[in-house]
Image (tube, rainbow, N blue to C red):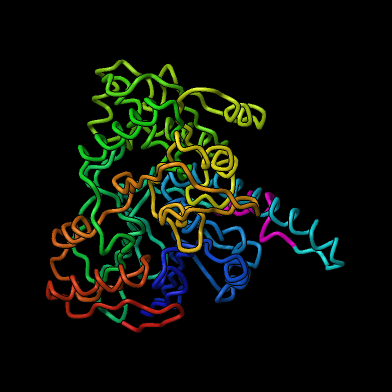
Amino acid sequence: MKLEFHGAARTVTGSMHLLTVNGARILMECGLYQGRRAESTARNRELPFDASEIDIVVLSHAHIDHSGNIPSLVKHGFNGNIFVTPGTRDLASIMLRDSAYIQEADAQYLNKKRRKKGLPPIEPLYTGEDAARSLEHFVSINYGRAFFLAPGVTLTFYDAGHILGSAMVALDVEEDGQRRRLLFTGDLGRPDAPLLRDPVIPPDVDILITESTYGNRLHEATEERMNRLRDIVNEVCGRGGKVVIPAFSVGRTQGVVYALHQLIDSKQIPPLPVFVDSPLSVNATEVFLLHPECYDKETLSFLTDTKSRSPFSFESIRYVREVAQSKAINTMEGPAIILSASGMCETGRILHHLKHNVGDQRNAVLIVGWQAPHTLGRRLVEKEKEVRIFGEVYKRRADVHVLNGFSAHADRDELLDWFDRTNDHIEHVFVVHGDEEASLALAEALTGRGVPNVLVPERGQQVEI
């Protein structure tokens, strides 16, 4: 078999790994690369292979850095099946169409500027029609159901506990009379994360492709995370300010809302207004409600004890779709909590809320997820005194707090603990989906555990096994 690493190699975004075995070309993930605009545009438009020669796509979960370039793949000639879990299929349906809307809106905005300069228009990366067409290729398979994928290759999904529908991809391969199991973690969740079940321990793994987003860092414990959230909200509320939370629409938003629900229900914070201001977040939350079979025991127990029909519904929460309602939030007086997308503060309504609130010292910005280099979110994490929003410079007077405990990614110790329980006879490990420093640190720790072949591949690197 041959592995080619075309994305999320020594970086976190643009996940894309190609397996060639028994003549079949199986693509694991087809994500959008996110970073500097010019580089992102070039990498997302120019696929590193002929799309028409890919036979099968297997998708671990719906996050855009894993799924977001599937419409381009189909647009450029891919005509095979895309295998997913039911939860991923439902989330991808809304996320890919939302991504297409952003692609079209960005192209429209840039073309206005290009017309003024006498430059030819640019095409969006893909359109809503492209996104809808790509969904016709999706085939849903439940966790734990072995499925014939290609000659000598069987697919089984295992619950990764990262977001709704997230899966580890196990490929049982028979080639040249030899049988081996390749496991791709996708993004691995945390054992004590809210809402979702813990990651499964798949058996009999020979070859591992593992993520490493937090391969050199640790998260707060659950109790510490909840206590810090409580203290930040009470402090800001006490001075009449607003807590602005940039949050990814899928997974992170629902986790934070559930935590606020618990704190309000236990009277640890006042029932102040909570606004979820992102159409995609609202749609994603509705998808979460369709899949209670993915909830963990703690969440099901909380719903029973509080007689709540939903982890995401309580008296003071408001879900916002309309633009007029979104604008009205920023004219409100008094304390409030505002969750909005995008999670890295690069697009979407969060930019408007930051514009109106970042300059007020009564307010706070709460960062609850990893922030890529060169994004506004990263600049906020680094507490720059001035930030640029919509091309204008604003003084940052609001506090900035970082709660990595809300991350849906396993940290260093959780990754290693999961590996130790999986590692019966792993012969090869490929460390991907992490900044270079994080990936190399995790690789060093795995080598120290006696794994004979650990590699942090470069983008475009090919490996024969």
As rendered, which of 25 and 87 lies closer to the eye? Answer: 87
Q: Position of residue 308 (x, y in %)?
A: 34, 18
Q: Is 128 placed above or below 279 here? A: below
Is residue 46 visible to us here?
yes
Q: Would residue 78 be visible to someone looking at this image?
A: no
Q: Tell me residue 85's x, y (percent).
A: 41, 48
**Residue 13 relative to residue 267: left or right:** right
Image position, residue 16 (x, y; %): 46, 67
User: In the depicted view, which residue is nearer to us: 165 or 6?
Assistant: 6
**Front residue of this view, candidates 461 and 367:** 367
Which residue is located at x 25 percent, y 71 percent? 441
Q: At x 70% / y 59%, what residue is drawn?
A: 124
Nearest the eye: 31 or 111? 111
Q: Quadrant of residue 351?
A: top right
Q: Residue at x 51, y 68 (%)?
A: 55
Residue 40 spot, x, y in % from top left: 57, 67
- In magenta, the rendered stretch is 123-137
Q: Quadrant of the N terminus?
A: bottom left
